[in-house]
Image (tube, rainbow, N blue to C red):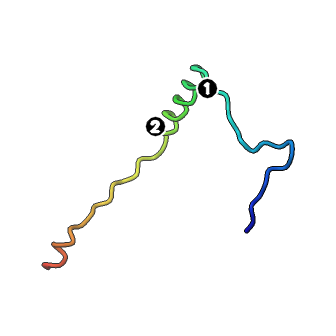
Amino acid sequence: MGFIREPKGVDFIIQSDPLTEKERKEISRFILDYKSKKPKSESKKVGNKREKLLS
């Protein structure tokens, strides 16, 4: 596989603008809503390997 160069006039470095306080709050609210609606997964019981070896 060879080295790929950037074509002339094209810049592959992306630098986004910083988020405003309003955007930051909207994203945080979306994440909280998503997590609250997500079904809770049941915790799995982990057995003790030592107990299995002794039985």
Q: Quadrant of residue 51?
A: bottom left
User: What residue would you read off at disc 1?
Assistant: 19
Task: Report the residue at 48% width, 33% height from top.
Answer: 32
Q: Nearer the viewer, residue 25 or 13?
A: 13
Badge 2, how many Cα within 10 Å: few under 14, some, many 20+?
Answer: few
Pick out the residue farthest to the right.
8
Q: Earlier in the sequence, mark 1 or mark 2?
A: 1
Which residue is located at x 51 percent, y 34 percent?
33
Q: Is residue 43 above or below residue 25?
A: below
For label 1, the crowd category at 10 Å Cα-Cα, with few meaning under 14, some 14 to 19 and many 20 or more, is few
Q: Is residue 54 left or right of residue 44?
A: left
Badge 1 vs badge 2, beta-carbon distance below 8 Å? no
* Residue indicated by mark 2: 36
Picture coordinates of residue 48 (x, y %)?
20, 68
Q: Is residue 42 left or right of residue 34?
A: left
The amino acid on which the numbered mark 2 sits, given as a three-letter code, is: Ser
